[in-house]
Image: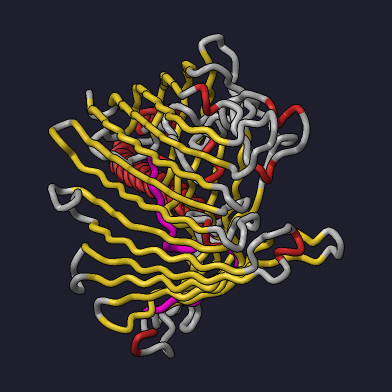
Amino acid sequence: MMKKTTLSISIALALMVGATTVDAAGKSTLAKRLSNLEKRIEQAEMRAEQAEARAKRAEAKVRQTDAQVQQVEEVQAKQVAAPVAPAAKPGEPTKEFTFKAYARAGTLFDDNFNGVKGTGPYMSPAGRLGASVGRLGVEQDKYMEADLQMRQTLANGAYAKYFLMIADGVDTNNDWTAADSQLNVRQVYAELGNLPSFTGAFKDSILWVGKRFDRNNFDIHLFDSDIVFLAGTGAGIYDVKPSDTWKTNLSLYGRDFGVVESSSMKVQNYVLSSNNYFNISPDSPNYWQLMLSIMNANDNADRKADAARNGIHAMVAYGDDKSFYGLRKGNSKSGIIYGHGLGAQAKNIGADGDLTEDAKAVRAFTYGGTQIAPGWQVAAGLMAEHSTDRYTKGDEYNWASLDLRFAQAITQNFQMVYDAGYQYMDLDNGTKTPGVNNSASGSFYRLTIAPTFKLDTAEFFMRPELRFMVSYLGWDKSLNGFKYADLLTDTEADRDSFFGNTQFTGSDRWLFGTQMEIWF
């Protein structure tokens, strides 16, 4: 665009060229016309500038609109790539997936930096009877459980749950353990609960069918021992409430004992169990537990001579979820178990097919935990058992195990754990086999110190725990080489002098190691 001064000068020069032919009057008229022309030029230039400004503003609006359109397109693209899950339609169940787990893994070696074999809670000669020496400082296995649950719940509260547990255990320290793996599906079952058609005593009951551990199994963690462990494949109902203070469970489990070699016929044991809880009052943490199980395994004696075909198992227990034997805040539980025939396996109900028809066992137990001072917590457990005619007519086994664990909080995330275990055993296999240690009596003791890291030392059972462990084990040498009569092989192995399940000889051993333990 030409500037105003340049245009004026050009016009003036053009007029000067023709000045010789114009008179004075014409000059005056020309000046006016020139002035008017300049004004019109100025107005035209102003309009041009205004038009240019409007064009720039319009261009800016176009760019802004393009940006907005692009943003909208990007948002729409994301919405297409990740659509929002539609809300459940009326009548459709809501779904909830849950993952839970337990695991432990560690390494253990002796004072010569040699790995150890056969150590663990049941390493002593009485281990086959369910006698634990305590777990801390002697576990060298790697074991895990992965629990997968899917729950579907209707609007009326009724739900269905599918449960799957996968477990594996190995002893090797290697990372690739497929050749040694015992990967197994330990549980697979389904439940139905809060069914609206169930009323009265069955209002809050739960139906289940499948392969599972019984929901109300309970253990003494220090021993890594269940007090009762009921498991198998079957069906049952939980939480039937005949009254405000009485809750009962009824279940039927099947277990396999193997086959009769002469016919390949499978021998199965069926366990019918009634587990009852009687609260002191509806809101009381104190309760009595009465559990009764009967079992039957047809043709079990055809599989093994003198093996029991039936049995009975009974437990009476008293629990307090709020106090340590009524002395202070904590928890405690005590009880007694009696078993006969197939029920003489006091812990694993109906799981031992080698028991004789006359087998009898009585077991007593107690355990509890409390805080004894600021930064100090203690847990203790005691089990004792007497059994006769267990695997052979005339055998007799007596044992008692005590475990005491103290946890001293040093900081919020570090504690010192001191664990002492003691076991007495008096074992007689009922035979007089020459050259074999048929009877033995004596003691085993263990002391473990474990510097431990965790998220919060104020919680005794909070996991995970990362531990470093030093243990001293001692035992009476007379226990070495003890053998059960029904396990004799008539080979040189019957005459070895190892302690229990280990390859230890002598009367003591130092163990060192590390371990992690977790559950959630």
Judged left or right of residue 164, residue 99 is left
Left or right for 15, reference 378: right
| Magenta span contains residue 224 | no
Q: Nearer the viewer, residue 95 or 179?
A: 179
The number of numbered badges drawn on the structure is 0
- The residue that appears at 48% across and 20% down in the rendered structure is 513
Residue 456 in view here: yes
Q: Is residue 248 left or right of residue 309?
A: left
Question: Would you say residue 208 sits in the magenta stretch?
Answer: yes
Residue 105 visible, this angle:
no
- Name of the residue lying farthest toward the right: 262
Residue 57, image x and y in percent? 38, 48
With 88 as the anchor, is 298 left or right in this view?
right
At 19% from the left edge and 32% from the top edge, which residue is drawn? 376
Query: Quadrant of the rendered structure where residue 172 is?
Result: top right
Residue drawn at point x = 32 percent, y = 70 percent: 277
Q: Residue furthest top?
A: 112
Q: Toward which corner of the image does residue 39 lie, by quadrant? A: top left
Q: Is residue 237 above or below residue 143?
A: below
Q: Quadrant of residue 420?
A: top left
The stretch in magenta equals 204-222
Image quadrant in which the N terminus is located? top left
Q: Residue at x 68, y 36 (%)?
A: 433
Which is more toward the observer, 303 or 61? 303
Q: Position of residue 34 (x, y in %)?
A: 33, 40
